Image: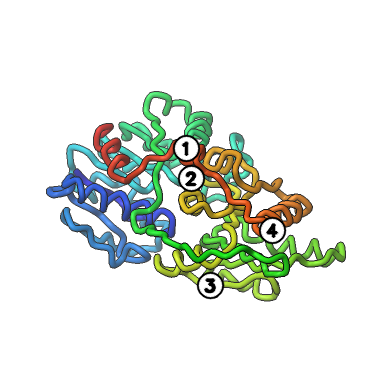
Amino acid sequence: MLIHSTNVTGLGACQVVTSFIDAACKLNLLDRSIVFLPDEGLLLNYLPSQGKVYRYKRFLPNGISRIIEIFFGKYLFPEQPVTIVLGDIPLRGIKNQVVLVHQPNLIYPRVNPLSGKSLKFSFLRSMFKSNLKYATRIIVQTDVMKNELLLSYPELVEKIEVVSQPIPSWFNYSNNTKQVKKPNQTLKLFYPAAGYNHKNHLFLKDFNDYLIQNRIEFPNIEVWLTLTAEEFVPFEKLSFVKNLGRLDHDQVMNAYKRCDSLLFLSLAESYGLPLIESLSISLPILTIDLPYARWMCENSVYYFRPNSFNSFLEKLDELNQDLCNSVNPNYKDALYKFPKSWEEVVKIFFEVG
């Protein structure tokens, strides 16, 4: 068995990889396996308890190195009976691959107009399509992602499978100190997301401009972001926005305990880990009304219409009133469809392999 995760650097994707590999180790499935991890980013210091680990070092710029890796994979990685790729795109020339796809921008814009239209994503889609013949199974996390991938790549009809995922393995939330919010208290919204374009942080800047131009009173809110200093530059002058910087696991847990609600603005998601995290701890959720969010959260959260600042204001007010009246969300129905453990997820990957 070979586990390939050399290109995984995003926060959510790294959480998926560590949760998956840790669960595989608990099941004693990686004793004689080979695990390829990146030599940078959040997985740099991660070391599984089983398997022979190699750090994949890139000597060329990341984009060029990634192209070489995808098209010349059979010369770069040892042949194994099964290869599990946790980073979206099958490797050319390697047989019997099980590929986890969690890059929503692999969907063609003609299927989902919110998918990335840049040259980078166009090329990613071409590479993905070109190498699909080397994948035995394609695993996605939601029915929405499955349907949109099938519309983009009809040849996947016999290969694609939905395997939902639970909260990350490190997520251990316990908080019995939540107090009833008072009407005059600031509404604290937590948006844990890196500064990718599809994460839609610019909505906050446009919202600020809309309020000023229309002389609308600013709501009493504080939005916590998790951006790098460079990513935060466009938002520095927004009075209601505070940047916490990139957070480790303990800091994420602390932010969940201190906030009043999750805010989720993303325009394109294969899953949305903060949504399942918030569902699992009964944290109120204010999110954009898109199919992926409806699939994840169903009808128990506060949805605002995309690109509608009036809708956003209405839902902020509704959320604030409910918090002040101790109205607690009930996510029982939404949570029913998610597996209880990562061990369940890993077993399915190994079975389809």
Q: 142 or 223: nearer the eye? A: 223
Image coords of residue 223 (percent x, y):
63, 66
Q: Is residue 103 above or below residue 82?
A: below
* Distance from the alpha carbon under mark 1 to that under mark 4: 30 Å
Q: CA distance from mark 2 to mark 1?
A: 7 Å
Cα separation, mark 2 vs mark 3, equals 23 Å
Residue contact between numbered discs 2 and 3, judged by CB atoms under 8 Å: no
Residue 115 shows up from this direction = yes
Amino acid, disc 4: Asn
| Amino acid type shown at disc 1 | Thr
Taking 147 as reference, is 200 above or below it? Answer: below
Tell me the residue at 45%/37% (across/down): 336
The numbered disc on residue 320 is 4
Marked residue nearer the N-terminal end (1 or 4): 1
Measured Cα–Cα span from mark 4 to mark 2: 26 Å
Determine which residue is flagged by label 3.
Answer: 244
- For the view shown, which residue lies furthest in the left direction? 32
Q: Quadrant of the N terminus?
A: top left
Residue found at x 64% / y 64%: 181
Image marks 1 and 3: residues in contact by CB distance under 8 Å: no
Indicate the position of residue 79 as horizontal and vertical percent values: 18, 43
Which numbered dot is residue 271? 2
Q: Nearer the viewer, residue 35 or 347?
A: 347
Q: Amino acid at mark 3?
A: Leu
Q: Secondary structure at mark 2?
A: loop
Q: Specify which label sits upstream in the sequence, 4 or 2.
A: 2
Residue, disc 1? 142
C-beta proximity under 8 Å, tags 4 and 3: no
Q: Secondary structure at mark 4?
A: helix
